[in-house]
């Protein structure tokens, strides 16, 4: 983990921290200073990113790896085609890969899923049914009315619906939390910052230029993407238009005390998305135009200041993977750019530039986020850190098998 991420105060000794007094020993490492975690889809691109980020995490220690039956039984170094810039962590090279079955993960406090959507649904459901906490990068449960869809800098309050999910499934500690589509993750961060500062947004137009890594490995055929832009990504526009409503909306209680996602219904938000695949390896860029409900709308300078001053709960709670600065606001007319800005805050931050008046709506700007970091594994890890700090994972929920 880069030095940019290690300046935040962290819990380094679970045995002396009041926070960790709630954890039973079977999900903790010897000495009681870390929680055991597992990774599903460990040999894939997202799984490899999970392993890279978790290899030196101050709270979480890799305890179990899951992949397809053809990889099961092999040492990790022999089961995967490593595609990360960083070297494979020594600590995982000789770990034996298991099948993605709950019985191999019973000692894990948290299970991170980097599974492809084709297989994620049934496997993640089985892990939840086995009373395991699953933090998923897949799309399968994003539309579930009891599963939070969380961008960690935007809506960690949606974790409040987890107890209702557990009750509906008759579980003590098992649940599923998903992170968002990689294209909308970065966009929702400045949108949330601006709604926080100026009130509801009523219209959003977004055009994405999405990196080829977003298609997974081996990704888009070279003859389709070199010297080209592909103006269609199957199902992507529908996901962007729907997910932004769930993320930016609330999760209020009704008269019976039950929570439901309101999909931004109090102040309806109209969203139009156009999604394109471009010949960039990593880093999703989006051109955004918005209209506020408030009249008159804020000026470009007021928007700029609101983004510069934005802070979020992941920072105030001292999540170890949350960067010290979430949004980097560029003054240069030609920034942000993927090649120059995708590794801002080790890929955990969001870059915004070209903030100006929109002659059709109110304000327009450009957003860049790292789709394989904050758009994928980094989000899941910070979501899990938030769940620890907000007592979503508690001793009462974690005593099975102890």
Image: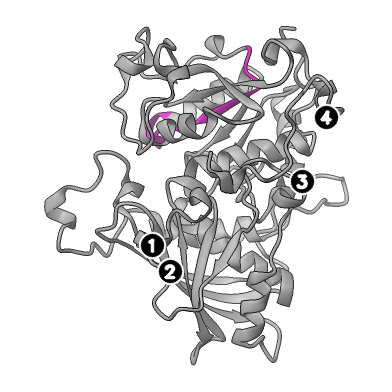
The local crowd at label 1, few if under 14, some if 14 to 19, many if 20 or more residues have their Cα within 10 Å, is few
Per the model, the C-alpha gap separating discs 2 and 1 is 7 Å
Picture layout, residue 121 above or below residue 333: above
Local SS, label 4: helix
Q: Residue at x 62, y 51 (%)?
A: 323
Local SS, label 1: helix
Q: Which residue is mark 2?
A: 336
Per the model, the C-alpha gap separating discs 3 and 1 is 30 Å
Q: Which residue is mark 3?
A: 317
Label 2 with label 1: CB-CB less than 8 Å: yes
Left or right? Give the position of 63 relative to 252: left
Where residue 392 appears, as percent x and y from the top left, is 76, 34
Q: In this figure, what is the number of numbered marks?
A: 4
Q: Nearer the viewer, residue 259 or 328?
A: 328
The local crowd at label 2, few if under 14, some if 14 to 19, many if 20 or more residues have their Cα within 10 Å, is many
Q: Residue at x 29, y 57 (%)?
A: 280
The local crowd at label 4, few if under 14, some if 14 to 19, many if 20 or more residues have their Cα within 10 Å, is some
For the record, the magenta segment spans: 107-119
Q: Which comes before the other along the chain, label 3 or label 1? A: 3
Q: Which comes before the other along the chain, label 4 or label 2? A: 4
Q: Which residue is mark 4?
A: 19
Q: Which comes before the other along the chain, label 1 or label 4? A: 4
Q: Assign the C terminus to one quadrant of the image.
A: top right
Q: Which residue is mark 1?
A: 340
């Amino acid at each position: 983990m880069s030095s940019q991420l290690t300046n935040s105060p962290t819990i380094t000794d679970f045995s002396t921290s009041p926070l960790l007094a709630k954890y039973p020993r079977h999900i903790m490492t010897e000495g009681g200073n870390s929680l055991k975690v597992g990774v599903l889809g460990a040999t894939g691109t997202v799984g490899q990113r999970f392993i890279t980020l978790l290899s030196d995490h101050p709270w979480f220690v890799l305890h179990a790896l899951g992949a397809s039956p053809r990889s099961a039984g092999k040492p990790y170094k022999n089961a995967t085609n490593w595609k990360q810039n960083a070297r494979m962590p020594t600590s995982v090279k000789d770990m034996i890969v298991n099948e993605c079955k709950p019985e191999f993960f019973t000692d894990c406090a948290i299970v991170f899923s980097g599974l492809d959507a084709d297989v994620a649904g049934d496997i993640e459901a089985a892990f939840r049914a086995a009373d395991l906490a699953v933090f998923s990068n897949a799309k399968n449960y994003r539309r579930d009315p009891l599963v939070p869809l969380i961008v960690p800098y935007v809506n960690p309050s949606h974790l409040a619906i987890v107890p209702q999910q557990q009750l509906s499934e008759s579980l003590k500690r098992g649940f599923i939390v998903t992170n968002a589509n990689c294209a909308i993750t970065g966009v929702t961060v400045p949108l949330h910052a601006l709604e926080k500062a100026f009130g509801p947004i009523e219209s959003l137009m977004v055009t994405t230029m999405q990196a080829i890594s977003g298609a997974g490995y081996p990704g888009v055929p070279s003859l389709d993407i070199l010297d080209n832009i592909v103006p269609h990504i199957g199902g992507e526009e529908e996901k962007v238009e729907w997910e932004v409503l769930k993320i930016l909306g609330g999760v209020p209680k009704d008269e019976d005390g039950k929570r439901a996602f309101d999909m931004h219904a109090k102040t309806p938000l109209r969203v139009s998305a156009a999604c394109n695949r471009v010949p960039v390896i990593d880093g999703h860029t989006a051109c955004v135009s918005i209209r506020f409900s408030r009249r008159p709308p804020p000026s470009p300078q007021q928007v700029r200041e609101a983004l510069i001053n934005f802070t979020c709960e992941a920072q105030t709670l001292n999540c170890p993977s949350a960067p010290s600065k979430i949004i980097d606001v560029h003054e240069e007319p030609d920034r942000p750019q993927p090649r120059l800005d995708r590794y801002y805050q080790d890929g955990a931050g969001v870059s915004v530039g070209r903030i100006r008046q929109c002659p059709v709506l109110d304000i327009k700007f450009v957003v860049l986020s790292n789709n394989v970091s904050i758009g994928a594994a980094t989000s899941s890890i910070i979501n899990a850190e938030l769940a620890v700090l907000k007592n979503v994972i508690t001793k009462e929920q974690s005593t099975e098998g102890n």
